[in-house]
Each structure stands twice: as C-alpha cells, then as structure tokens.
Amino acid sequence: MSLEENKAIVRKVVEAENNRDYAVIDELISPTYFNQPNQIKGSEGYKQFLNKLFQAFPYYHETIEDIVAEGDKVCVRLRIDTGTHTGELNLLGIRVAPTGKKSTVKSIQIWRIVDGKVVEQEGVYDELDLARQLGLIVPTEEGKKLFPKEVK
C-alpha cells in the first residue's frame, strides 16, 4: 500500500470513531490488532474500548492536526475534544465519577498498517493535563505563580 493509502486508512478510522460507525471499524481494524498501552486486542476489543470512552465522554471528537507516513507506519498528532465528562472514566488507574467538565487534550499516535488494515497502534496523551482540566488535580499556590497561563 502507498503512504497516501495508509494515511487515508487512519483518517477513515478517526472519522469512523467520530461518527460512531462501527462497521468501518470492523472493516479497517485487523482481527490481529494490538494496542500495547491499553492492552486492546482485535476489532472487538477496539469497539469495547470506544464504548467505554464514549460512555464517559458522549461528545468525544478527534481532529487530526498532523499526519506523516513512512513505510507501514502512520504518525498522527491529534486534538481530542472530549465534550462534557458525564460517565465514569478510568484515568491514571483510578475510577473517576463524572465531573461535568470539558477538556481538550493532545495525543501522538503511531499506527501500523498491513494489507489495508490497522494491525498495531501505540500512542500517548497527556493524562495529567486531562486530570487537571477535569478538576482532579489542583495546582498549589506556587504552581499558580510559576505557570499562571497554564492554570485557570
């Protein structure tokens, strides 16, 4: 597959997530898919993960800000607008009750594409910033002085 075709597959998966279109997820996520950070296996595991995410953030939406491909890998920089946190969330290994707050976080992900399907995905997002935006972490007075633009 070409680099452009691989990028198109990632774009389609992100669009399918945003539209809650699980038929496209089944089409483009390999049965052998594996996500190391979240221990997700296969398209069924992927959909279960999305269900939990959408229960916590019903208006969750990803925007691709940058996309680069080389070989069988596609690297994506995402902005994730979570919408209002209205359902239970597992964050930093802790179950978090709904906070009613909104957040926007950044994520960098690397997707591996084989024969037109996503077989592997790994990424990071700023869980600490998400916790701060949801009001789970309160900055100290010293932190407010050092980082006044970052603290609301």
Image (tube, rainbow, N blue to C red):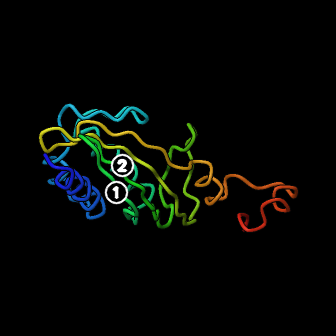
For the point 56% across and 50% down, which residue is it? Answer: 126
For the point 43% across and 43% down, which residue is it? Answer: 123
Residue carrying label 2: 75
Percent position (x, y) of residue 36? Answer: 39, 32
Percent position (x, y) of residue 110? Answer: 36, 43
Q: Are marks 1 and 2 in contact (CB under 8 Å)?
A: yes
Looking at the rendering, which quadrant does residue 112 occupy?
top left
Helix, strand or loop at mark 2: strand
**Residue in the foreground of this view, choosing between 76 and 45:** 76
Three-letter code for the amino acid on which mark 1 is drawn: Ile
Q: How many marks?
A: 2
For the point 23% across and 35% down, which residue is it? Answer: 42
Percent position (x, y) of residue 55? Answer: 40, 55
Q: Is residue 6 left or right of residue 120?
A: left
Q: Is residue 37 above or below residue 51?
A: above
> How crowded is the residue under tag 2: few (<14 C-alpha within 10 Å), some, or many (20+)?
many
Three-letter code for the amino acid on which mark 2 is drawn: Cys
Which numbered disc flags the more N-terminal residue, 1 or 2? 1
Helix, strand or loop at mark 1: strand
* Disc assigned to residue 91: none
Looking at the rendering, which quadrant does residue 146 occupy?
bottom right
Q: Is residue 121 above or below residue 127?
A: above
Residue carrying label 1: 67
For the point 29% across and 36% down, which residue is it? Answer: 120
